[in-house]
Amino acid sequence: MMRTSLSGRLFNGFNAVVLALLALLCLLPLVQVLAVSLSSSTAASAGAVKLWPVDLTFESYKFVLGKPEFPRAFWISLERVLLGATINMLLTITLAYPLSKEPAAFKGRTAYVWFFVLTMLVGGGLIPWYLVIKAAGLLGSIWALVLPGAVNVFNVVLLLNFFRGLPRELEEAAFVDGAGHWTILWKLFVPLSMPALATLILFTVVGHWNSWFDGLILMNTPEKYPLQSYLQTVVINRDLSLITMADAATLSQVSDRTLKGAQIFLAALPIICVYPFLQRFFIKGVVVGSVKG
């Protein structure tokens, strides 16, 4: 076994301390929000809650889940993630496969690659983007949140580079055995590219789940807002409609702060649950998918 020098151990220790501090900086705000959401309205309003609940109560969660606004927005975001991630990954895979071929095997490949890369460098702007979606008749529908970003060129570039790193001998052997391109793609390339695909799925799911701006612009009524757009109206614009609908007994247990904390934590919970299962693929997928040009 190789021995690590003193300077190497000090460097590793310094990195561990810095990464631990960064992890705490990311984790502590969420812990504080959770503590506020589980505290009584009196403690939260007085600012007495730090990193542990004061006068533990689940009334804020019962109140939020008992009203139709939050579950409806949650379901819209879930529908958006399922549709968006499925469509995005299908288009990304089928687009990355031909673009991963050598120019000799796919004539015009370089021109197609530059066509897509230019879309990352030059954008049409917010108003043309909105007008195109409106002209397509998508305003107010779930497809307005899914189709405009159906092809993520950054994900395509990552995946095509991953495909190019796979041994060409496997593809040639499959051709010799009589397999066509579709068979090679779905039975050879896709199973071998699970680290990259898991990484792209994570990017796509988080992107759809956290998106809020397009929901505000493209949805006609607040009843059609996805979850993050709904939270923007509640947390940033201080929509107190939930509080005004509460009775006196409920107001003694919940407050504006505790309700916001409960909604923010519930909105972050799905990503917190999904990320650990995909995290082990994350580094390998990004690194391997970016080393070939």
Image (cartoon, grey):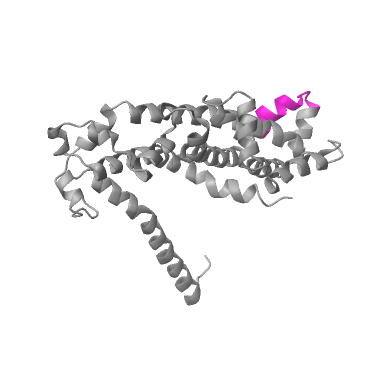
Can residue 156 be seen at all in this image of the molecule? yes
For the residue pair 192 and 163, the one nearer the viewer reads as 163
Q: Is residue 269 magenta?
A: no
Work out whether 158 lies above or below 226: below
| Magenta highlight range | 176-189
Residue 169 pos. (x, y %): 77, 38
Q: Is residue 179 magenta?
A: yes
**Is 107 placed left or right of 230 in the picture?**
right
Q: Residue at x 61, y 51 (%)?
A: 287
Can residue 102 be seen at all in this image of the molecule? no
**Is 13 placed left or right of 255 in the picture?**
right
Q: Quadrant of residue 69?
A: top left
Q: Main secondary structure of the magenta part?
A: helix
Q: Residue at x 79, y 28 (%)?
A: 175
Residue 27 pos. (x, y %): 36, 53
Q: Residue at x 62, y 39 (%)?
A: 127
Residue 269 pos. (x, y %): 36, 39
